[in-house]
Amino acid sequence: MSSNTNKPSSSTSFSELIILKTFDDVTFSVERSVIMKSITIKSLLDDGCGDVVIEYLTKRVKLTDEDSETKTYEENFAEGFNYQKMFDLISVANYLEIKELIDLISQKIADRTKDMQQEEIRKIFNIKNDFTEEEEAAIRKEYAWAFEI
């Protein structure tokens, strides 16, 4: 990955642009203020989630937490993403130390899985059921309230 700096051509903006280029020749023009949201942003672009993370960071720089547009953006964020894409985004956000994105994607996953049966959740998270039938029956009996949906 390489980076170059350019001044934007617009006379209304004086923010320095950073051009990030991945090993597969995908380039991104990003304002320095966006790049500064993460110390290790360069690794972001090599993971295949670069465009989504750059879009998110750009919105977060421009919008405030109280802004209604921010709330709408975050409510609609990750629409159409499959679980694997969201897991990849959490991994990238964790590596890049973008707490807001980790929290947002984690909440989206929680919202999608909250009413699912345990078998569905195990499949999504690739969790092997290591309980015997007897152990599982005992757990279901002891914590029956947790299995009521």
Image (cartoon, rainbow, N blue to C red):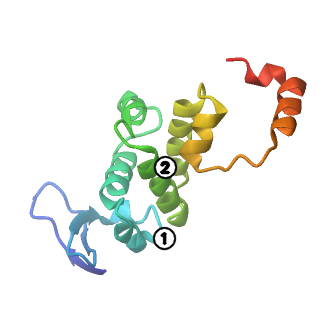
56 up-or-down from 1: above or below: above
Residue at 54% x, 31% y is 111
Which residue is identified by label 2? 101
Which of the 4 quarters of the picture holds residue 24? bottom left
Q: Earlier in the sequence, mark 1 or mark 2?
A: 1
Which of the 4 quarters of the picture holds residue 118? top right
Q: Residue type at mark 2?
A: Leu
Q: Nearer the viewer, residue 47 or 60?
A: 47
Residue at 80% x, 44% y is 131
Pinpoint residue 98: horizontal percent, then vertical percent.
51, 57
Q: Select label 1 or label 2 by which is in front.
A: 2
Which residue is identified by label 1? 39
Secondary structure, mark 1, is: loop
Quarter of the image where the N terminus is located: bottom left
Quarter of the image where the C terminus is located: top right
Residue at 56% x, 33% y is 113
Disc 1 to disc 2, C-alpha distance: 15 Å
